[in-house]
Amino acid sequence: MTAQHESTGPLTTEAGAPVADNQNSQTAGVGGPVLVQDQLLLEKLAHFNRERIPERVVHARGAGAYGTFTVTADVTPYTRAKFLSEIGKETEVFLRFSTVAGNLGAADAVRDPRGFALKFYTEEGNYDLVGNNTPVFFIKDAIKFPDFIHTQKRDPYTGSQEADNVWDFWGLSPESTHQVTWLFGDRGIPASYRHMNGYGSHTFQWTNEAGEAFWVKYHFKTDQGIRTLAQDEADLLAGKDPDSHQRDLREAIERGEYPTWTVQVQIMPAAEAATYRFNPFDLTKVWPHADYPPIEIGKLELNRNPENIFAEVEQSIFSPHHFVPGIGPSPDKMLQGRLFAYGDAHRYRVGINGDHLPVNRPRATEARSHGRDGAMYDGRHGGAKNYEPNSFGGPTETGRALWEPQPVSGVTGDHVAPSHAEDDDFVQAGNLYRLMSEDEKSRLIDNLAGFISKVSRDDIAQRAIENFRKADEDYGKRLEAAVAALRG
Ligand code: HEM
């Protein structure tokens, strides 16, 4: 616990003056009205009114822990990132897990993707990998994200999540069929944050010392084993113990049962991207393992709970644009949108100096920018010059880009992402369905039908079902029958 908890000194005001009475406010005589001179009362009420910051617009509900990433393979042929430069090298990390649609106080045991946001405190600055527990996503262009999330959140009129909105959007966005199949399958409700995988989801660029570029996808395979909840188990648990995931993570770490993940990457030489059978930058697709086998590169362990949830979890900020030398973005249109969205959200939610908070600031190096001032600036730069170039010394640019430039062609415009030989919106959804056992298929159909049957309009339900039929005839037929049975 903190020094304040152990302290025996007097209680004080925020300004440090001793407090005489913390139980009774000052009044004009016994039984009279309260006095404005009672600054302790005013300070307490005013401070209390400002205890909240805006919750995250998505992924508001979450839990985090610190830990260590250890390199277990030589990846120097692919990336010059220093934290990946030697087998056995350790880097401190902070990982925040989350659900997506629920508000800050929502229950954990729900059908929803889980966030898997990982901050590596490297010696070349913080590297953030802001992924999910799903290898793919619902949409493939950032311009659709606000609309998509509106359908997952509360309807402006009813104030609740509405099946109509969810299925209307998914039905009209056939590229969501793969992720929706994933989400309504067994893995759609993890038993805990410890018992699920994490994925970087997007394709990222790695570049080595010689400047050669590779495309990579990250996988974090849980060493605890995958465990999931059936819909009825989850419904019960969500009511009985809304904090089930958060508590499970904290208590496991308190018991010294540190959860671990085996870290793997799929690596594609940059030259292969143009002719790969799928667009390798399409977030609604995986790279089949037969094409690019995952290679083990490290171990992730979580071993320390945050001491103060607000300071370390609520105020933590993860940005897909936090890269380090040797790692960069791909042209994935979703990722490109995210490169803007997170920093912007952080400036609104936590403030312009949010990077200075202990959980967010680099730990293995120092931030040396010419950014200054703003709300809650702590004066860390002292009297140093606040511009560059200057004639007084201080930090200077390196002249070397963090990642390699990529060739582009054509003219500017609202372009659909390129389609490769085997790209369509259904092929991988169908493959996933056909991989499932008969039991898995029937649970998938039940889960989907349970939700689609709540849609109020037949055309919306029917359009949604047609997407699954396009993925696999049997899938569509069974779903249609199950929905019809429930709708009566
Ligand atoms: C263009 C699409 C997307 C946009 C515009 C977007 C935007 C956002 C925003 C604004 C936040 C809140 C950030 C904050 O207040 O700190 C957030 C959180 C998050 N997003 Fe996204 N998002 C997108 C897609 C994705 C995808 C594809 C993934 C996973 C692969 C993802 C994973 C996360 C995670 C894990 C968090 C929580 C981070 C934390 O724990 O603080 N998002 N997103």
Image: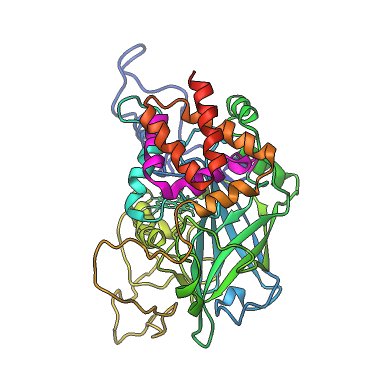
Give the vertical position of 341 relative to 326 (above or below): above
In the image, what residue occupies the spot 31% across and 13% down?
32
Residue 427 in the image, given as x and y percentages of width and height: 51, 54
- Magenta stretch: helix, strand or loop mostly: helix
Q: Is residue 288 magenta?
A: no
Residue 52 in the image, given as x and y percentages of width and height: 40, 38
Give the vertical position of 352 relative to 314 (above or below): below
Q: Is residue 187 magenta?
A: yes
Closer-to-camera residue (313/335): 335
In the image, taking residue 209 as reference, residue 320 lies left or right, namely left
Looking at the image, the residue that sits furthest to the top is 31
Q: Report the colour scheme.
A: rainbow
Residue 40 in the image, given as x and y percentages of width and height: 38, 32
Can residue 351 be seen at all in this image of the molecule?
A: no
Give the mark count.
Answer: 0
Residue 478 in the image, given as x and y percentages of width and height: 56, 34
In the image, taking residue 246 as reference, residue 452 lies left or right, namely left
Quadrant holding the N terminus: top right
Give the vertical position of 268 relative to 245 (above or below): below
Q: Which residues are magenta?
A: 163-192
Q: Quadrant of residue 286?
A: bottom right
Q: Quadrant of residue 309?
A: top right
In the image, what residue occupies the spot 47% across and 55% down?
284
Closer-to-camera residue (62/392): 62
Give the vertical position of 164 relative to 84 (above or below): above
